[in-house]
Amino acid sequence: MNLTAFLKAVDEQTGKMDLQECTAFIHEIARGYSENQRQDFLRKLKDAVSEKGCASGGGKTGRGDISLEEETAAVLEQIDLIEGGELQLNEEYNDAYDDWYNSDVEEILYKDPDGIKDILEEAAALAHTCYDRELYGLSRELYGRLRTIDISTDGEYSGEALSLEEAVRMDLLDIDLDALIRESIISTYLDSEPEERAQEIFDIFSSVHDPAVTLESFLQSSVIELPGTQEFLKSMVSYLGNKRGRTESRLIEEALSLEDSWDDFHAAAKEYAADHPGLYKTAVFENPGNLDREQLYELSMEALEKIPERFAIRSEIALKAADLALVSGRNREAEIYRIEVFRSEVSPVNFWRAYLESENSEHTREALRGIYSEYIDESREILKKEYDYSPGYAYSGNETRETSPGRNALLGILFFDGRFEEVLQYGMRTKNAVGWSSTFMKQGMALFMLDLYQGKDLPYGCRAINRQACEAVGFRAKQYCKGTERPDDGGTPDEIVFAEYFSDWKKRIPMSGELQESVLQKMEGWIRERVQGIMEGNHRRHYGECAAYIAAYGEILESRGSAGAKARIMENYRCEYSRRRAFHEELRRFGMKDRKKK
């Protein structure tokens, strides 16, 4: 239960109680406090009484406030001197620091000849005093300067100023950062005009990188009940609605959650779908509106219409829509939503799911081709390059990230669509026999090998290649089964499920016999070049990979009728690299038999 809902429930119950019942209830709560909590409880009671007594006092300035204003002005002048470099820390290199052997200690130490520690700790204490005296204008200004201060240094080594957070972390200052941020936010809230609060509070949150600092935590931590919280939450939603960013997304969702109104949440999701599609994701997956299954299905359809098609987050909602459709017997609609998954996250696995799970696979294949062809046209020059520096398929947490398949993803999709000649043309070429990790060569070798193998059960070498292919295309059985009728038992390894689906796929999209023979001949050359490059460069950690290619190639030939091919090929490589004992061990691991001594 969030704070708003909790307070509503408390107000509802206390509203039913008379004075005697309230007093008895408070007495019972007090009995439950431990000794170290009792003073804090009494302070809150006294604050509540004093607040009621001075509610009509006509202002917050009391005895001694003039001196506090003068003290604040003097401290702010000293902060100006620190930021202007007239007062600064001196840097000293720490001889105990070593980048290799002792990197846990600080590389640079700081001396404080100008008394910056005393100035800033005094400023924090003064800000807290102003806060306690309800002089929120003064505490807001002091806390604001402290939060954003750049502590000047003499630049002897690093030449960089320190933030308050860095200085506290390095034990240069003894300041409670949590309390500082909390009281800074509350001071800003109480000193701001209602129409300015959202922007002012957001400016603080955008400069604080602690995920524990939330709207609920600051509303809950105030010793007084903050005025106008519902209006503030609404204005925060309105202010953030058209602003993108992780902080913005987190705060708008939290503000809506604290409002505790499904109608407001739904309205915001519709209005701000182009900037905050995560609201729809929360609505569909967490169901804050307590919708029934049919209503959730309708909401997911609405989300797919409202969220821009290329947003990757839309693919998650499309998968949920497919699941909801299947539960209600809408199998044709589920097929459409699996295509929408691919539209919003163009990847080999999403292509596979939509194609393999379709009752009209050729119609689906044409629809999928229409989607990815746009990216092929946009990325034709990328395909001609050798390396792929794309970030991959994983959802990064940025709710407005657009799908952007890299070179390897597009080549993987072309392969699964049976466009093998294009894959050979663009993907299976490299200037070097090493440095394959950022190319399509490893993925392409694995996929072509699995396609060429004609046996039923995968032998040892092909199993290693199957694992490589499974990992390369990003296949995860649990994720694949979403939006389908396939059961996910959770216990079968990904590579076993991948091998099963791959076998199904290659029956549907077979490679011509002529092309198979051509690829077999090319593959022998690719393996020879790879092994030669690895041996010449003494890259021992790749010996196992080379042995897997050699073993799998022999197993492929045997599956196609060439008896004894695996043993013959492995022996040839053993003889060619007769002094590479580590290489021989890898070959033995994949089934090479030692020759009998005469």
Image: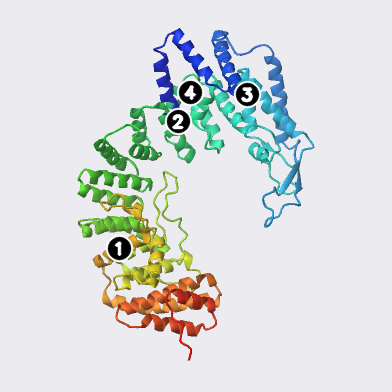
For label 2, count other residues whose C-alpha is less than 10 Å away and answer few (under 14), some (14-19) or many (20+): some
Q: How far apart are marks 1 and 2 (CA)?
A: 51 Å
Up-down relation of residue 3 to residue 322 (above or below): above
Taking the image as shown, residue 12 lies to the left or right of residue 74, namely: left
Position of residue 535 measured from the top left corner of the image (x, y, whole percent): 53, 77
**Which one is in front in this view, the residue at disc 3 or the one at disc 2?**
3
Dot 1: what SS?
helix
**Which one is in front in this view, the residue at disc 4 or the one at disc 1?**
1
Nearest to N terminus: mark 4 or mark 2? 4
Up-down relation of residue 418 to residue 221 (above or below): below
User: Which residue type carries mark 3?
Assistant: Ser
**Which one is in front in this view, the residue at disc 4 or the one at disc 3?**
3
State the residue position of label 2: 239
Up-down relation of residue 284 to residue 96 (above or below): above
Taking the image as shown, residue 580 lies to the left or right of residue 513, namely: right
Nearest to N terminus: mark 4 or mark 1? 4
Position of residue 303 measured from the top left corner of the image (x, y, whole percent): 31, 40
For label 1, count other residues whose C-alpha is less than 10 Å away and answer few (under 14), some (14-19) or many (20+): few
Label 3 close to label 2 by CB (< 8 Å): no
State the residue position of label 4: 195
Identified at 50% across, 15% down, the residue is: 26
Say which mark, if any, is on residue 139. 3
The answer to whether one can see residue 494 in this image is yes
Label 4 close to label 3 by CB (< 8 Å): no
Dot 2: what SS?
helix
Nearest to N terminus: mark 1 or mark 2? 2
Q: How far apart are marks 3 and 2 (CA)?
A: 25 Å
Say which mark, if any, is on residue 500. 1
User: Which residue type carries mark 2?
Assistant: Tyr
Nearest to N terminus: mark 3 or mark 2? 3
